[in-house]
Image (cartoon, rainbow, N blue to C red):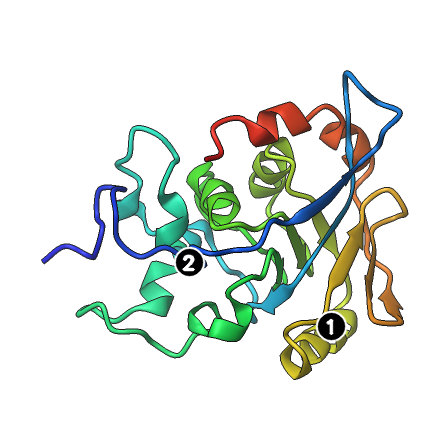
Amino acid sequence: AHEPGHGCGGGRHRGSERRPNRIWINPKLMTLPKISQVAGRAIPIPGDDIDTDRIIPARFMKCLTFDGLGEYLFYDTRFNGDGSEKSHNLNLPCFRDASIMVSGANFGCGSSREHAPQSLYRAGFRAIIAGNFAEIFFGNATSLGMPCVSSSRENLKELSSAIETDPSCEVVVDVENRGLVCWFKETISCAVRRKLTERLTGQVLNLMRGIH
């Protein structure tokens, strides 16, 4: 038996009534605007070495386009073989509107499939905060206009704890200001790879293309 919606048509959709994510665009750059901040609710996805096959299982990569990939995000860790839900943060209603993901070290490792960042983007995520990132995943995510910023294990634990305590709190990823991540009155420092802001410059047109 196939999973619901196998073949990228129909099936489960994470957060079908999601609220629009807020993205700040530098008003001075009209022809090549850049993403300077991303703000929204966040979700902790704990664990190190989360590879691309866990993010999007290979059997869901038969689509002619990336449309619909979001519904299969983390499918095998979210659902049992019969389609019933496992215990996973992505299945919890309190995290349905999350647009920023918080995870561990070596995020996006494994095969160099572009489908992994595409599935995250199509599921509504606009920034990833983790310990560090696999090189190819980082490049593909940045090309989508999805900032990837790194922080220490202690900072990630503190941020995840705050999100779990109040899933409605707004988290701000300040790409332009050295990748600072803020929530309520708290701030943690994050590392932004050199020229990340420049690589995001001009991505907004690409970011909007094909999004329905």
Q: Is residue 203 left or right of residue 186?
A: left
In the image, residue 201 lies at what x, y percent?
Answer: 76, 27
Q: Which mark is residue 122?
A: none
Sort mark 2 into few (<14), some (14-19) or many (20+) by Cα contacts within 10 Å.
many
Relative to 73, residue 24 above or below: above
Sort mark 1 into few (<14), some (14-19) or many (20+) by Cα contacts within 10 Å.
many
Count of picture labels: 2
Residue 54: image quadrant is bottom left
Q: Mark 1 or mark 2, which is nearer the start of the sequence? A: 2
In the image, residue 19 lies at what x, y percent?
Answer: 57, 54
Q: Which residue bears the numbered disc 2? A: 14
Residue at image position (83%, 71%) is 184
Residue at image position (84%, 32%) is 26
Residue 25: image quadrant is top right
Of residue 122 and residue 81, the one placed in the foreground of this image is 122
Residue at image position (59%, 47%) is 134
Relative to 94, residue 182 above or below: above
Q: Secondary structure at mark 2?
A: loop
Q: Give the mark toward the camera: 2 or 1.
A: 2
Separation (CA) of disc 2 from disc 1: 23 Å
Q: Is residue 20 left or right of residue 157?
A: left
Relative to 14, residue 58 above or below: above
Q: Secondary structure at mark 1?
A: helix
Residue at image position (22%, 50%) is 5
- Kind of residue indicated by mark 1: Leu
Of residue 90 and residue 141, the one placed in the foreground of this image is 90
Q: Quadrant of the N terminus?
A: bottom left
Q: Which residue bears the numbered disc 1? A: 159
Of residue 149 and residue 144, the one placed in the foreground of this image is 144
